Amino acid sequence: MINLKGGANNQPNQPNQPKNANAPPPAAKPTTLPPQGQLPSAQPAGNKKNVKPKKMNVKLLTVFNLIPVFFHTFVKIMPVGLYLASFLESMLFNDIRGFFIFVGLLINDLINIGYNYMMEAKPNINCAVVRNVFTDDFFSFSTPHTQYIAFVTGFLMTSMYFKKVFYYSTFFMFAVLIAMTIWSRITIGCKDILGAGFNLLFGTFRGIIYYILVKDFYEPEDVTPEDHWLESKLKALFPDSDDLDEMFQ
């Protein structure tokens, strides 16, 4: 190293030494305690007993949430009820009309199974009839619930049209079932209003076409269905002709 005064420094290079070699090491930073009432992020093993578990939000079962659950469950199993009702009517009461409705529901399901297979439609978990809560496995029908009830409704309405009769009890009962089904499917997120309307129209159309195909075998001209007790009660509320209606007098 060259001396600033002009001479050369003959001393060997010395490593840089700290200014104060005898100074004590820096003190460790004090640990900051959490505010009062809060637990630190990491607790020692001996303080686990002091940690309180989080409480789960449990909703009480009341009539206000029990009734919607009952309606949703009823709509979910309604296709099974339609199958059983039509089959048992055919077997127990020796009525071939129930058998034709059973076959129509089966054919409608087979058509939808083939359509879903060709289009590779992905099932919606909100439409599940049976679901495993521990896994993501679920089972849903190939035919939408709205299409089930619309198919039977279109079939029966077409039957009344060809016989030139109108049963208030049948129309009222299936109108309530259709409204309940559409409301349930939209509420649980299975369908939207557009999809429910499409299934309603498509199911009704299939029911009309199916009745036209089997009407000669389903209900011959000499067969007259018996009036239901509810039908006689509803007929008393409506006039049979315009002459009995007070609005036209």
Image (tube, rainbow, N blue to C red):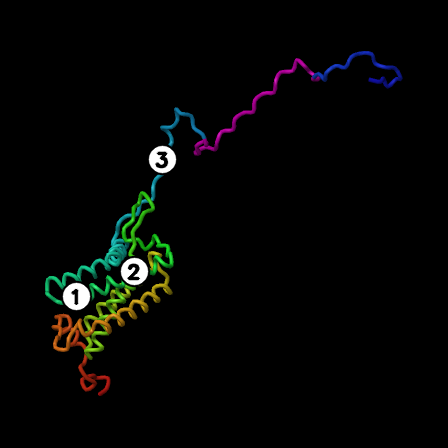
Frontmost of labels 3 and 2 is: 2
Badge 1: few (under 14), some or many (20 or more) residues near its Cα, within 10 Å?
many
Q: Which mark is residue 53?
A: 3
For disc 2, the marked residue is 143
Q: Are marks 1 and 3 in contact (CB under 8 Å)?
A: no
Q: Is residue 117 left or right of residue 161?
A: right
For this orientation, the residue located farthest to the top is: 11
Q: Earlier in the sequence, mark 3 or mark 2?
A: 3
Give the numbered dot on residue 216.
Answer: none
| 3D distance between C-alphas at marks 2 and 1 | 20 Å
**Residue placed most toward the observer, 7 or 20:** 7
Q: Which residue is mark 1?
A: 98
Q: Nearer the viewer, mark 1 or mark 3?
A: 1
Q: Amino acid at mark 3?
A: Pro
- The residues bearing labels 3 and 2 have C-alpha atoms spaced at a distance of 45 Å
Residue 199 point in image, percent of width and height:
33, 65
